Amino acid sequence: MNARAVVLAFFCALTASAQVQMRIPSQRYKSHDRINVEIVNASARDISFCVEYGYVSYIDDNRTEATPTPVYVQQKRENGWDTLLTGPDVGSIRQSVTLGRGESQTYPFRVNAHGEVRMVLDYWIGAPVGSCEYPKRRRTAKSRAFQIE
């Protein structure tokens, strides 16, 4: 009976992680390089997530570009993964986006960091359910880790 529970939990974890894929084209980037994060709906149902408008990425120390994004960045540390504070403090607008089965969208992003990082996306199954502030039935997808030099 206990072995069944372990197998069922493992299957559920695989199924949940397969619903949304985040594709990062390369394994290595330099700080401030453009990273195109592709979000793919690999499930049989619609998925929704929130995109933050008002976010800017730094091309270099003097230039920025608008990069609306649904993802946040985590960096590997000695004790695990820490979320980087990369978003705007004030003035942003969050709006939900829905992807149908098999659809994808790409979002450009730049990170001022060094080391091993990954992208994280909060999403939910189905059409938008209320506000982006506290979406109900939220799930999380993580990209594979990659290096920023």
Image (cartoon, grey):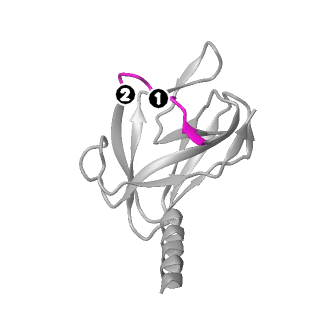
Residue at the location (44% across, 25% down)? Answer: 88
Question: Where in the figure is residue 113, as x and y percent of width and height?
Answer: 65, 29
Label 2, residues with CA under 10 Å away: few <14, some 14-19, many ≥20? some
Task: Indicate whether residue 66 is drawn in magenta.
Answer: no
Marks 2 and 1: in contact by CB < 8 Å?
A: yes
Q: Nearer the viewer, residue 117 or 45?
A: 117
Question: Where in the figure is residue 17, as x and y percent of width and height?
Answer: 52, 63
How many marks the image carries: the answer is 2
Q: Which SS type dominates the magenta stretch? A: loop
Question: Where in the figure is residue 66, as x and y percent of width and height?
Answer: 50, 27
Residue named by callout 1? 87
The residues tagged by marks 1 and 2 sit, at their Cα atoms, a distance apart of: 9 Å
Q: Residue 75 got which mark?
A: none
The type of residue carrying mark 2 is Ser
Whichever of callouts 1 and 2 sits on the residue coming sooner in the sequence is: 1
Q: Residue 92 got which mark?
A: 2
Residue that protrudes farthest toward the top in the picture: 62
Label 1, residues with CA under 10 Å away: few <14, some 14-19, many ≥20? some
Question: Where in the figure is residue 84, as x and y percent of width and height?
Answer: 54, 32
**In the rendered image, which quarter is residue 60 located in?**
top right
Residue that protrudes farthest toward the bottom in the picture: 1
Residue that protrudes farthest toward the left in the picture: 130
Range of magenta residues? 80-92
Quick check: 115 above or below 39?
above
